[in-house]
Image (cartoon, coloured by chain):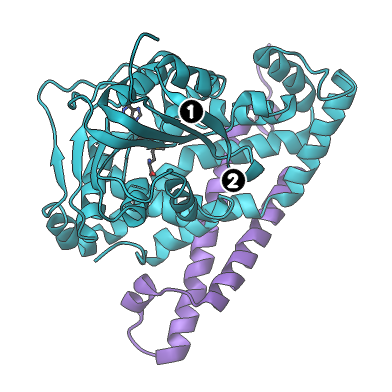
Chain colours: A cyan, B purple
Amino acid sequence: MAFEHLQLKQRGRAEIDFMLSTFLGSSTVRESAEQAVQSAIEELAGSIEALPENLDERNSQLESFLYNVRSFRVQQLLGEWYSRNHGAAAVRAFEEVQAKLQIELDQLSSGKTTLETFPDFQAPDYWRDVDFHRTEGGWDGHPYMGFVHGEIVHRKMVDSLFPGGIFKQRRQVAALAKQDHYDNILDMGCSTGHFTKALAETYPNASITGTDLSLKTLEHAQRVGNAHGYSWRLLQRAAEDTKLAHDCFDLVTSYILLHEMPASAIAAVFAESFRVLKPGGEILMSDVSRYTDLNKLEQWRADRGAMYGGEPHWRASASLDLSKIAKDAGFIKVNAGGVQGAKYPYVVQAIKPHEVGNR
Amino acid sequence: MSKTPQSFNKPGRPTLEDTDIAGVGAAVLTLTRELWILNDRVQVLEAVLAEKGIEVQQEIENYQPSEEMQARLNEQSQALVEKVLAAMQSD
Ligand SMILES: C[S@@+](CC[C@H](N)C(=O)[O-])C[C@H]1O[C@@H](n2cnc3c(N)ncnc32)[C@H](O)[C@@H]1O
């Protein structure tokens, strides 16, 4: 059985509906806050382009104007409340149904999808003790955080607020890889396995390996794999240091992993992908919009979202030129950009050359 | 100078300050949430009672709103949010 049709109990269901209502029911506030933003730009700079180059300076200028406007302050309150409470609301909703699910959760921990942990494993400093998404304890903040995030936060919250739905988008991104068949796929930052599943559906004959730092999300990926009868190999390993053999994959992917990593680790991820790919193998990395593709106002919005949404690495990560990083790692035929003219998702595709000579 | 008995009428005890306002806002929203959950629950109770007229507790716990009812619930909870936000922005 799978969790697609998870039924919450009344309290959890209504609480989650309400969390969404704080967004969907606040359009009046958001509209008037938006007007204030437009006036701030007019007053402070005259145009979006004339706003300060430096993001912190831009933010403090805009804030000095906007915090005088009540609707803006109320909007900040709503945002802050959502950030602080959405994770806990999902945990509460889970705990109401946990007893009912327990047998199934236990059963799905064994099956053809395996999970390997290693005594020498150590999560990097940029990840450990970070409350990603402002969820207390971050990715491993609850014994069932993988279930909570994958099945409740994603299915019941993110999917409703995300244009087109995040599950559908995973399938669209998975389908962008260039070949019709792959033998061996590595999914980096696989988390709860939902992009991994999109890969498995798109390339049914491929053997799939997934890595993540978070044990709790990997445990859920294992349940997802087993629920659908897949034989994934899941490893608690850093994407930039998988310890897997050289030249063994023909596709390496990541879906919204990179914005959770600092620049040096991202360069290392591309280098590691290069190392584990067979010559002729391919990468498919999907992440958030590049700041260079956004105007100064859009950058400011994205940046505040990151600043207050538990995304410490977003700014530096979204400012990187991923296509240069891919080339520096040795990849050729590098193609990077938004999908179908959109700025999001931003996808990098490239090939490991057959002849790896002097670069 | 000793205090007059009358000064006890309005002692002017300091309570909340401007810096507490974010907490007040959060409390109002928390309260709104609780109120909403209760409102939702009552509606489910009514719906279930109307259908059966008996032992309804478990049914309420596990009740999954129909699409139509969900749409109504969403509309009403959003309207409640709107109302509270409007009050918060009044002088
Ligand atoms: C937004 S989630 C990925 C979503 C996932 N691909 C999906 O489709 O649901 C980001 C994940 O990256 C993981 N992560 C962050 N840094 C990592 C690293 N250096 N190596 C492996 N995983 C990492 C986090 O633990 C988290 O599970």
Q: Camera-side residue: B27 or A143?
A: A143
Which type of secondary structure does the marked residue at label 2 adopt? helix
- The percent coordinates of residue A216 (x first, y second) are 24, 40
A221 relative to A287 in the view: left or right: left
- Residue occupying image coordinates x 47% and y 29%: A310
Residue A201 numbered mark, or none: none
- Residue occupying image coordinates x 53% and y 52%: A19
Badge 1: few (under 14), some or many (20 or more) residues near its Cα, within 10 Å?
A: some
- The percent coordinates of residue A260 (x first, y second) are 43, 27
- The percent coordinates of residue A338 (x first, y second) are 59, 37
A66 relative to B11 in the view: left or right: right
| Residue wearing tag 2 | B28
- Residue occupying image coordinates x 70% and y 33%: A73
Name the residue at the front extreme.
A355
Res A332 seen here = yes
Tag nearer the camera, 2 or 1: 1
Q: Quadrant of the N terminus of chain A?
A: bottom left
Determine if the C-beta at disc 1 is less than 8 A from ligand 1: no
Q: Quadrant of the C terminus of chain A?
A: top left
Residue A333 numbered mark, or none: 1
Q: How many labels does the image show?
A: 2
Res B19 seen here = no
> Based on the displayed image, in which of its 4 quarters is residue A293 positioned?
top right
Which amino acid, by three-letter code, is at mark 2?
Answer: Val
Chain where mark 2 sits: B
Same subunit: marks 2 and 1: no
How much space separates mark 2 and mark 1, taking CA atoms?
Answer: 55 Å
Which amino acid, by three-letter code, is at mark 1?
Answer: Lys
> In what quadrant does ligand 1 lie?
top left
Which type of secondary structure does the marked residue at label 1 adopt? strand
